[in-house]
Image (cartoon, grey):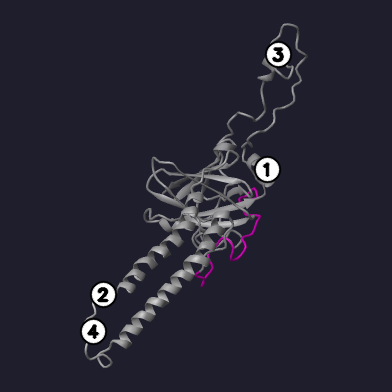
Amino acid sequence: MLALDGAPMTLPEPGIGMPVDGKVTIQPQVTPNGRRALWFHDVILFPMITIISLFVLFLLMWVVFRYRRAANPVASKTSHNTAIEIVWTLAPVVILALIAAPSIGLLAAQFKPAPANAVTLKAIGNQWYWTYQYPDNGGFEITSNMLKEKDQVQPGERARTDADGPRLLATDNRIVLPVGVPIRLITTSNDVIHAWGVPAFWIKLDAIPGRLNETSFTIEKPGVYYGQCFELCGARHGYMPITVQAVTPAVFAAWVKAKGGTMPGNAAAPSTAAPAQPGADVTENGTEAANAAGPVENATSAAPATNQAATGNPAGAGNAGQ
């Protein structure tokens, strides 16, 4: 959760959901598709690439040594070798087939439609910040800007701290999503092409003006996860970070309520209407149809659009870091 002043109450875990200086491996994955992709990389792709590279290097060194002028003054005039030609034709076919089977399955899983109970997050790219909407939770909106460093802020602005996250990745407003619940991510843009990406989720989806792109994922572990825009979108492309805070469904519901939103499927308030009178239209539950259609608190009314806790940055949306 976030405090009322926008300061994070959940501290980021070093090495989880963020890049680590000096590391060249893939970030630890916290989604089913991410774990599947990491296994595919570590168990199939990387060993196969290593073996092929070493084999080709060995052949090059062997040819250079074996057929050098001193050891082979009379060059061979052999032009064909049927066995070798069959091998070097079939071997790549077999290798590609072994790679294709798991990669096609992973690609299909990445674009599998979200189930009916998914939480929808709409990410809208702008130059150079993100706005977010929760259509299933009353449609409230959040604007997220990069937090500047202490020596860059103006009086009254909130500077980044270690509790916010790494430099160039921390934002004034975090996106809050529930763990264990499918997330339907919809991306679009108000200006140029952007790309919403969080490496720990194995997610990178283009945000294109006039178009809606969609994918789904499920976060398995609570925590704070960082991403950024992955499509060159202008002068301040490198200053469009993404911060996602994954919490339990109960905490997510409380956060949505605090933002003025609603949770889908909220039960209607108990009816206090008088018993049906003779001749009145009665529903299957024995109550009058007019009463059954009576007001339901927070069930259908749209919540007011509000930004997440203010940070005191007078620069406004999209001007962070300038």
Q: Badge 1: how crowded within 10 Å, few (<14), some, or many (20+)?
A: some
Q: Amino acid at mark 1?
A: Ala
Q: Amino acid at mark 4?
A: Ser
**Residue shown at 23% from the left, 76% from the top:** 79
Residue 233 in picture, x, y percent from top left:
38, 53
Q: Badge 2: how crowded within 10 Å, few (<14), some, or many (20+)?
A: few
Estimate the spatial distance between the alpha carbons at disc 2 and disc 3, rounded to whole Å: 90 Å
Estimate the spatial distance between the alpha carbons at disc 1 and disc 3, rounded to whole Å: 36 Å
Q: Which label is found at residue 76?
A: 4
Q: Amino acid at mark 2?
A: His
Residue 204 in picture, x, y percent from top left:
47, 53
Left or right: 138, with 105 as reference point:
right
Estimate the spatial distance between the alpha carbons at disc 2 and disc 1, rounded to whole Å: 74 Å
Task: Give the labeled residue for mark 2.
Answer: 80
Considering the image in quadrants, where does the C terminus appear? bottom left
Q: Is residue 60 visible?
A: yes
Task: Give the labeled residue for mark 1.
Answer: 254
Estimate the spatial distance between the alpha carbons at disc 4 and disc 3, rounded to whole Å: 99 Å
Mark sitting earlier along the chain (1/3): 1
Element marked by disc 4? loop
The magenta stretch spans which residues?
Answer: 1-24
User: Does the segment drawn in magenta span residue 127?
Assistant: no
Labels 4, 3: front one: 4
In the image, farthest residue toward the right: 275
Mark sitting earlier along the chain (2/1): 2
